Amino acid sequence: WWRHTRKRCPSCSGRVVTCNVRKRWRHGDTGRPELQISVTAVVPVNVCVMCGFEYEDHKAEAIRQQATDAHLKRGKSQI
């Protein structure tokens, strides 16, 4: 579902809507893939209705960080 916002597109100044998207990302030492973890979370993605530019803001970054921390905490409790 889309949620209308008062935000403006940083690319064209058009109106921005937000939707929640399930995303997966890799976290950890990029030089050593065996030390990376895969984390999934639902994050808000902002989309310009005029030019289609997509971006994530500080809210998405905070959710990513919380999901990563929770994943790492679960891993430590299983050791």
Image (cartoon, grey):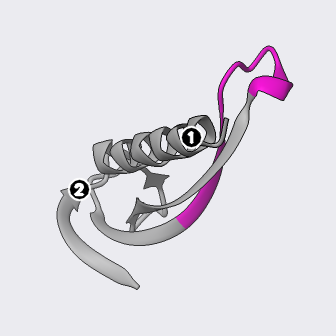
In the image shown, does 8 or 58 lie closer to the viewer? 58
User: Percent from the top left, x then y, of residue 43?
Assistant: 44, 60
Asked whether, in this view, residue 20 is left or right of residue 26, the answer is left
**Disc 2: CA contacts within 10 A as few (<14), some (14-19) or many (>=20):** some
Residue 49 at least partly seen: no
Q: Is residue 21 magenta?
A: no
Relative vertical location of residue 51 with respect to residue 1 in this rendering, above or below? above
Asked whether, in this view, residue 16 is left or right of residue 40, the answer is left
Residue 20 at least partly seen: yes
Asked whether, in this view, residue 32 is left or right of residue 43, the answer is right
The N terminus, quarter of image: bottom left
Nearer mark to the viewer, of 2 and 1: 1
Callout 2 secondary element: strand
What's the CA distance linking mark 2 and mark 1?
43 Å
In the image shown, does 24 or 2 lie closer to the viewer? 24
Which residue shows up at 83% across the image and 26% down it? Answer: 33
The residue range painted magenta reads 22-35
User: Percent from the top left, x then y, of residue 20?
Assistant: 43, 70
Looking at the image, the residue that sits furthest to the bottom is 1
- Circle number at residue 77: 1
Which residue shows up at 73% across the image and 30% down it? Answer: 36
Which residue shows up at 70% across the image and 19% down it? Answer: 29
Relative vertical location of residue 18 with respect to residue 7 in this rendering, above or below? below
Q: Amino acid at mark 2?
A: Arg
Asked whether, in this view, residue 51 is left or right of residue 7, the answer is right
**Disc 1: CA contacts within 10 A as few (<14), some (14-19) or many (>=20):** few
Residue 17 image-quadrant placement? bottom left
Q: Amino acid at mark 1?
A: Ser
Disc 2: which residue: 8
